[in-house]
Image: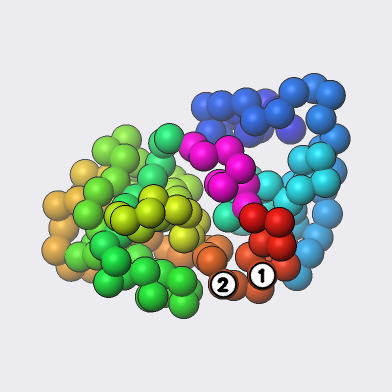
Amino acid sequence: MQDKLRENFNSVFFDSKASVEIGELSGKKLVFINGEPDFMYENEKIIFTIRGLNKYRPKEKFVVVDMGAVKFVTSGADIMAPGIVDADKNIVKDDQVWICDETHNKPLAIGFAFINGEEMIEKNKGKAIKNIHYVGDELWTLTAKSL
């Protein structure tokens, strides 16, 4: 599991003594680290949950949206390029990305990039990210109790 996470995220999130279990919740296959649902599978890829983002605070693959986009992102809408104010320039198409707002920098959602990071910043129209998991969805509600 550590190798797969290192491959996906260029980082190690837990040591060999950690309890790692795979289970299902609300129709999603989750990876529990020491009993906490920190990662999930989406299309055979391991990605963060919102809970995992809050716990590990990754510095890469971020996308910052303006405050006007927040209500749409947290309603499950895909992220549109005009609402993006900043992004990790190393993002490439199909990367897992995490979305935060420009004021608080708190994770709002997780998705997959339709375009690269530079395009996200420069484009003024079109979809930039497919929203997969967001604050307020069923999975977040079930796992956010101790955030």
Q: What residue sits 54% from the left and 66% below the top?
A: 135
Percent across and percent down for residue 137 are: 59, 72
Tag shown at residue 1: none
Q: Is residue 80 visible?
A: no
- List the residue tagged with mark 1: 141
Disc 2 marks which amino acid?
Gly
Helix, strand or loop status at disc 1: helix
Q: Which residues are magenta?
A: 51-58
Callout 2: 10 Å neighbours few (<14), some, many (20+)? some
Magenta stretch: residue 117 in it?
no
* Mark 2 vs 1, N-terminal side: 2
Total tally of numbered discs in the picture: 2
Residue toward you, 145 or 35:
145
Cα gap from disc 2 to disc 1, whole angstroms: 6 Å
Residue 8 vertical position relative to residue 38 in the rendered view, above or below:
above
Percent across and percent down for residue 9 are: 53, 33
Quarter holding the N terminus is top right
Callout 1: 10 Å neighbours few (<14), some, many (20+)? few
